Structure formats: structure tokens, C-alpha cells
């Protein structure tokens, strides 16, 4: 009958459409999985690098602070010795210059630490972005499963139509026999 032919054509169309949607979903998923895997590796390596840089900057800052403290103690001692007339102004000036140098090195180490911490924070932001990409991959995976389920439904509908066609043929054959 026309209804069965129409149902058969509709089922075939649904299968064709489901195949196309499933293929596109699988392709998008594969692309997203490759992209997120590469980005995840890159970001993890960057995080390790930035964490190491922060630790190194903290160590350099600590070393600079120790040198600054020593230079300050030397300067105070030199000023006292100068006031007591034990050392010349030139020696006091050298201690002052050494302290100023140590102070500049300490400030530079602070800036380096701050910069490395900012870069580490940026790497953490990249890591959060990768998590969003992973969420996108999970969404794509759900779309693929949904597309596969729709295709399975379309195939089941096609089978139902074929079974109805067989029933109609059987009934027609019985009617002709009778």
C-alpha cells in the first residue's frame, strides 16, 4: 500500500540522515580529541616549566636577601668604623656601594619572582581552558552516542516497515488463496 511505501521511504531517509549526522559527529569528535590531547600535553609541560621557574626565582630571591642582609651589616659596621676614625671614607663608600648593589639585586629578584608567578598563573588559566576543551569533547561524545541511537531507531523503523510489508504480502496471498 501507499502508506507502507511512504513509511519505507521515510525510514530510508531517516537512516541516510542519521548516517550523515553520525559521520559528521564522529569526525568532529575525532578532531576535538586530537586537538585537546595536543593542547593538554603542551599545557602540562608549560605548567611544569613555569612551576620550576617560580621555584628558581624564589631561591634566587632568598639568595639576594641574604646578600642584602650581609651588605647592610657590613655597611653599618663600616659607618661605625668610619665615625670612630678607624677606616677611611673610601672604605665606607665601598660598603655603601656594595649595599646599594645588593639592594638592586634583591629588587630585581623580587621582580623576577613576581613575573614568574604571573606566568605560572597564566599557565594555570591555560590549564582551565583545556578543561573546557575536555568538556567540549565529552559533549561531542554524547552527540555521537545520540546520533548512533537515532540511527539505530531509524534501522529499527525500517525493519518494522519491512515486517509490515511481509505481513501485507502474506495477507494478500491468503486473500488470493481464499
Image: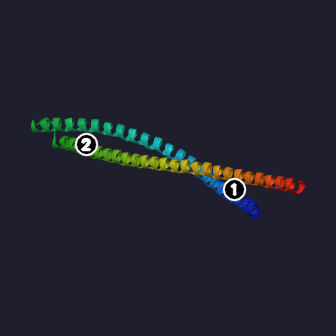
Helix, strand or loop at label 1? It is helix
Q: Residue furthest right?
A: 177
For the residue pair 102 and 42, the one nearer the viewer reads as: 42
Q: Percent x, y for residue 27?
A: 64, 54
Describe residue 48's horizontal placement relative to residue 171 as left or right.
left
Describe residue 130's horizontal placement relative to residue 77 as left or right.
right
Of callouts 1 and 2, which one flags the residue occurring earlier in the amino acid sequence? 1
Describe residue 9's horizontal placement relative to residue 175 as left or right.
left
Q: Quadrant of residue 176?
A: bottom right
Label 2 crowding class (10 Å Cα cut-off): few <14, some 14-19, many 20+?
A: some
Classify the position of the N terminus by image quarter. bottom right
Residue tagged 1 = 19
Q: Percent x, y for residue 49?
A: 46, 42
Helix, strand or loop at label 2? It is helix
Which of the colour schemes (rainbow, by chain, secondary structure, one colour) is used? rainbow
Residue at x 87% of width, y 54% of height: 173
Are circles 1 and 2 on residues that touch, CB within 8 Å? no
Classify the position of the C terminus by image quarter. bottom right
Residue tagged 2 = 98
- Rounded to the nearest angstrom, the CA distance separating label 1 from label 2 is 77 Å
Q: Percent x, y for residue 158?
A: 73, 54
Amino acid at each position: 500500500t501507499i502508506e507502507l511505501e511512504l513509511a519505507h521511504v521515510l525510514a530510508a531517509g531517516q537512516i541516510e540522515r542519521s548516517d550523515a549526522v553520525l559521520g559528521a559527529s564522529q569526525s568532529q569528535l575525532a578532531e576535538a580529541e586530537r586537538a585537546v590531547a595536543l593542547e593538554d600535553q603542551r599545557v602540562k609541560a608549560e605548567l611544569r616549566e613555569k612551576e620550576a621557574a617560580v621555584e628558581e626565582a624564589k631561591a634566587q630571591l632568598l639568595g639576594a636577601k641574604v646578600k642584602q642582609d650581609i651588605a647592610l651589616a657590613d655597611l653599618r659596621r663600616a659607618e661605625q668604623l668610619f665615625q670612630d676614625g678607624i677606616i677611611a671614607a673610601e672604605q665606607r663608600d665601598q660598603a655603601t656601594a656594595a649595599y646599594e648593589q645588593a639592594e638592586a639585586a634583591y629588587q630585581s629578584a623580587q621582580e623576577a619572582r613576581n613575573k614568574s608567578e604571573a606566568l605560572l598563573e597564566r599557565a594555570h588559566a591555560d590549564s582551565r581552558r583545556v578543561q573546557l576543551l575536555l568538556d567540549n569533547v565529552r559533549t561531542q561524545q554524547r552527540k555521537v552516542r545520540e546520533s548512533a541511537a537515532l540511527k539505530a531507531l531509524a534501522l529499527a523503523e525500517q525493519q518494522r516497515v519491512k515486517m509490515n510489508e511481509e505481513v501485507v504480502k502474506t495477507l494478500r496471498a491468503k486473500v488470493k488463496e481464499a
